[in-house]
Amino acid sequence: MNFLKSAVASAIAQGPPFPYTFGDKVSGDSDASIWTLYNGTRHSNGSDCSIFSFNITANSRLLPLAKNAVKKLRTMRHPGVISVLDIVETDTYIYIATEKVVPLRWQIKRKVLNTETIKWGLYSIARTVKFINDEGSSIHGNLNVGSIYTSESGEWKLGGFEVLSNVKDEEAIIYRFGSLMPDPRTYSPPEVERSGWDIVKKGPHSAVDAYNFGTTMFEIFNGSFMPDQAGQTKGIPPNVHVSYKRLVHKDPKARITVGTFLEQGRRSGGFFDSPIIRLTEGIDNLGVIGIKSESERQEFLDQLEQHTDDYPEEFFKVKVLPELLKSVEFGGGGPKAFSLIMKISKKLTDEDFQLRVQPMVVKLFGNPDRAIRVCLLDNLPIMIDRLPQKMVNDKIFPNLVSGFTDVAPVVREQTLKSILVIIAKLSDRTINGELIRHLAKTANDEQPGIRTNTTICLGKIAKNLSASTRAKVLTAAFTRSLRDPFVHARNAALLALAATLDHFSDDECATRILPAICPSLLDKEKLVRDQANKTMEVYLQKIRKAATSMPDTVQPPPQTTEAPGPRMSTPQASEASSWAGWAISSFTNKLSAASGEMQTSANYVSPFPSSKPTSPPSTGLNPPQRTVSSSSSTPQVSTPAWNPPPAETYFKDPEPTENDGDAWGDMGDMDDDGNAFFDAPAERTKSSQKEPVASPPTPFDDSSEPDFAGWLAAQAQKKTGPGGGKPLPKGLAKSNGRSTPTSKKPLPARPAPKPVAPKKIDTKPKETDDDDGWGDGW
């Protein structure tokens, strides 16, 4: 093989330039032709081709046949004839560069041809032979399986023009050199076998090709042919038996022509009455506007789609696809043609797709035709993996987003659905910028289905959103959809919230998501209520899990330098379920945390008067001391060492006086004896130490209400200290212009009030008419 390539290269170097590169030799066809077939490559564009090579030095006696073939190929122009690219002739060789072809014998030996494909191929050869016999007034003379090739499109092409002769030429090459053809006895008609090629002049010139067409049919259906098998119907379809027998009749005058056989086969129910053949005839006119009406074109495309499996894959790639592309590009094919293109493109390699289909797809996205746009969007899943990311982001997406604002709802909806397909091909900037803005518009679309699909779309592309915008966008979109009047939009929002649970923080789940879900628990539609319960449970599980990892408290431990004293106790764990116990515990804890442990002082006088009537004065200035004792059930407050007045004193409303409005000012200026409160002399404290000691304290009855007023007064005493403590803030003291007395006047004793029943605190929340205003205060 290497020696042969070197010899070919040497011959080319000595002759005229041949702009083709020789490839591998196509073996298995040397016995059926005088030519040696090579695979080749064209220098100008790198496309594949075939090269028929004839060595003049080694086959000089066959040179007339080779020269005749070259001559006829130069002048013969027909779709069924091998297409010639270039021919080079020298004294030592002849090269014919043609389209890429493969010997038909290969496919016959491998038995890869189905009946419909064979009918289609024989139909193409019959048309070519008819053209040669009738329009060309010529005889092929070498028709057999060895002279038929298949192109890249899968079409059958006729070659073997070594003895092609015009019947008007008395010195035609077929009469002189017909016997030099390879294996002439196998395929020669009976009359030629008996009397030689000169007998052809006396009979119909089409008789030779008719006989050879019949034997070719037999060989194709059976894989081989012997002279004694002519007329046998083994493997031949029943509907062609009669015509076939007339083709191979022993009497040349009784044979029908190939043109007649073709006409009979095209009749209704005939051998060539096949959908694939009818469709092939219409493909050439498909891309020309006006050749077919709109209804005829659509019917043709429907039939073509139904019979795609009957055609060779190469036929669709090379023959049908270019015509469909032209039809779509120039407006003749429409969406149906594009759908067929997408179906064919599944069988294309990535290289062929980028070369043939990709440029057309980018161009069509700029087409304003809505039908084309919808068809493009429907077929995006088929071709998205083959489209480069840069092309999708920079060229396709800018044209695609125009569908978001189209007046046709179907275009808007299909554009929205296509986002799920192309999202992986878009840049982060495009997703979090332009795309989010368009989705915000479709979330408010007048069509409920588009609003619903927008929610679904956001839920599916949540992972593609940036972390800085994800929670904000999703929360706003989903909570808005929860209030949508369309039931499926609300249900979609709940489903999307459940699917995007991991994208929200624990705080967002507790403070924003769960409050938004709660109204859906009482939705009017059971579908929404059920889904709301499921979504609520998912979020609750997440929050509960987060709560288990939190500390019991974030408050610092109480710190104080003073000696611990009596303090109010907190309720035990058994009272955790009681509202009153919870309220008292929280209230106590808040005060303790704010100012440390609560303590009382023996020498403390509160500077702020109580709003309740005061108790009878004691013999000294020592304020009543109150202690708090701990109880296992209910907080108890101890009474001071002096005899307390009845509870009615604290809960009885004071009698109105003329100067009630100035009570806070008077109490700020004067003490009980009419002296200024903050101007009392220092001896006030000393004289108070001589007063008699109060009686032992009486414990607080558990059934009574705690003395909150006295407890608060004790707290105030603790803060101000003994002897009056700090003065009132500036502005609270009201001057009356009187002088400050230096002696204390005892207050007259008041009669003890009658005991009254303790008041019960109503712990039940008051009902209001405004159910929706509960959150305004928060």
Image: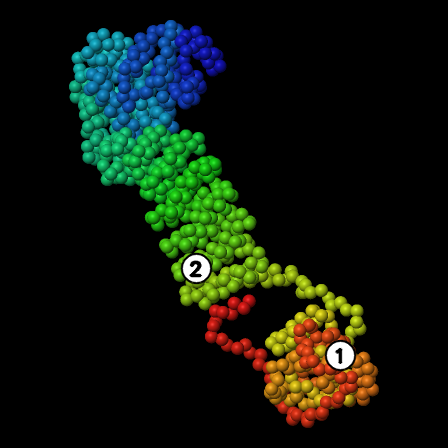
Q: Is residue 637 above or below residue 404?
A: below
Q: Circle 1 sits on which residue?
A: 679
The number of numbered discs placed on residues in the rendered structure image is 2
Q: Is residue 241 above or below residue 186?
A: below
Q: Circle 2 sits on which residue?
A: 490
> Which of the numbered marks, if any, corresponds to residue 291?
none
Camera-near label (2 vs 1) is 1
Q: Nearer the viewer, residue 61 or 498?
A: 498
Q: Amino acid at mark 2?
A: Arg
Name the quarter where the C terminus is drawn.
bottom right
The image quadrant of residue 310 is top left
Q: Position of residue 89 (x, y in %)?
A: 36, 9
Q: Position of residue 629 (x, y in %)?
A: 73, 80
Q: Residue at x 68, y 63 (%)?
A: 554
Q: Amino acid at mark 1?
A: Asp
Q: Position of residue 376 (x, y in %)?
A: 37, 41
The image quadrant of residue 356 is top left
Q: Residue at x 79, y 82 (%)?
A: 684
The numbered mark, 2 or 1, whose residue comes first in the sequence reads 2
Q: Secondary structure at mark 2?
A: helix
Q: Nearer the viewer, residue 589 or 61?
A: 589
Q: Residue at x 23, y 19 (%)?
A: 132
Q: Tell me how far mark 2 sits from mark 1, CA to CA.
A: 72 Å
Q: Position of residue 267 (x, y in %)?
A: 19, 32
Density class for disc 1 (Cα within 10 Å; few <14, some 14-19, many ≥20) is some
Res. 709 in view: no
